[in-house]
Amino acid sequence: MRFLATFKKSCDFKRWLKLVDDLKPHMNKHGLKLIVAMESDDGTRIYDLGEAETMEGVEAFVSDPEVIRMRADAGVDTESQEVIAPVGKYHIFD
């Protein structure tokens, strides 16, 4: 399943990208991957298109205490996490 999500952050985009790299083992463990991510113009939000093997994997990832700690330490407002909508088809333009 694919989904569009968003959350608030206080870190810069470069720091958030490092967080994603640091979280890869947790993402792999729970069957998640990011397809594309964008930062809002004012730098306070991330919008991302993700893919998950199961909804249970998403729930396990966002409730994992270490993931929560790592995200919070990096400047992610974990309380603001929101799945906007499930996504069917998509295309990434070159």
Image (cartoon, helix red, strand yellow):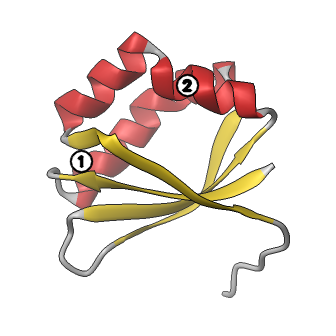
- 61 shown above or below 32: above
Disc 1 to disc 2, C-alpha distance:
20 Å
Of callouts 1 and 2, which one flags the residue occurring earlier in the amino acid sequence?
Answer: 1
The picture quadrant where one finds residue 53 is top right
Give left or right: position of 6 versus 89: left
Reply above or below: 41 against 45: below
- Up-down: is 57 above or below 48? above
| Quarter of the image where one finds residue 88 | bottom right
Q: Residue at x 23, y 31 (%)?
A: 72
| Residue bearing the label numbered 2 | 61
Q: Residue at x 40, y 22 (%)?
A: 67
Q: Position of residue 75 (x, y in %)?
A: 18, 41
What element does badge 2 sit on? helix
Q: Which label sits in the foreground, 1 or 2? A: 2
Nearer to the camera, 94 or 81: 81
Residue at image coords 67%, 56%: 3
CB under 8 Å between callouts 1 and 2? no
* Callout count: 2
Question: Residue 79, how many percent across, how many down?
Answer: 31, 38
Asked whether residue 31 is in view, the answer is no
Query: Residue 64's spot in the image, x, y percent?
Result: 47, 15
Q: Amino acid at mark 2?
A: Phe
Given residues 79 and 45, the one toward you in this image is 79
Labelled disc at residue 26? none
In this figure, which residue is indicated by the disc labeled 1? 15
Residue 61 is left or right of residue 28, and the answer is left
Of all residues, the one furthest to the bottom in this rendering is: 94
Task: Check disc 2: other Cα within 10 Å, few if <14, some if 14-19, many if 20+.
Answer: many
Quadrant of the rendering where the C terminus is positioned = bottom right
